[in-house]
Amino acid sequence: MNNDSENVLDNASARARRIDNVTLTDRAYEMIEMRIVVLDLEPGQVLSESQLVEELGIGRTPVREALQRLAAEGLVVVMPRRGVMVSEINIAKQLLLLELRREVERLCACKAAQRATEAEREHFTELAAKLAASADAIDYDAFMQLDLEFNRAVLAACRNEFIERSMRRMQGLSRRFWFQNYRVALDLERCANLHADVARKIAEGDRAAAGEASDKLMDYIYEFTRATL
């Protein structure tokens, strides 16, 4: 496991321990999903339910339910009588996913700009500044954590459970693809600044501008994806 993977996994484990009101299934899901996203569990790898139970310290039923959720999101494939396998990374499917993600991301940003509370707007202003700082410093580790915080803040502020469900089902696949390729294809300065611009427009409550900023960010993510071909 590389240092990037270790840092992200440590943060995910700490976050899971801090959340007291989530179910054991939620905890198992977050921990397994993160290990898949950072490629600690590699595409094509067959997972051992018993080994996951032992490694996570969580019972068999929550682990099994977490794997079912991951299968619904496309991160694992259930093979009857053979177990569960981490799904392969497919760039053609990633490009198709981006067609849908573009539309949902725009809607989510617009609704967040419309519905965010004052406290949330202050948080988005802070996020914009931190994202811009990570761009200036070319700080991959900081950006990775801020990106996750940004995504969760936007989902919370849009206040639409159906948008949130749709986004959560896409984000794991997108983050795994990004993690696989960011060291060789990502323009961190451009990407972080585009995220910062979305955060600013949401903070300002400008729905139209937030939608336009989201489209510009997705334009770049599409370019990034194509660059991995």
Image (cartoon, rainbow, N blue to C red):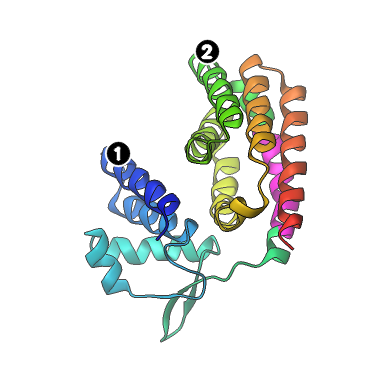
Check the image and report above or below for 55 versus 191: below
First to last magenta residue range:
95-108
Rendered location of residue 192, percent (x, y): 63, 34
Residue marked by disc 2: 118
Q: In which quadrant is the C terminus drawn?
A: bottom right
**Residue at the location (41% across, 47% down)?**
8
Q: Residues within 10 Å of mark 1 (few under 14, many from 20)?
A: few
Rendered location of residue 116, percent (x, y): 56, 21
Is residue 105 part of the magenta span, yes or no? yes
Q: Which badge, 1 or 2, is on the more N-terminal residue?
A: 1
Q: Is residue 170 left or right of residue 4?
A: right
Q: Is residue 52 left or right of residue 181?
A: left
Pick whichever, 229 or 24, lies toward us. 229
Report the predominant secondary structure element of the magenta stretch.
helix
Residue marked by disc 1: 19
Amino acid at dot 2 = Glu
Q: Secondary structure at mark 2?
A: helix
Check the image and report above or below for 197 versus 81: above
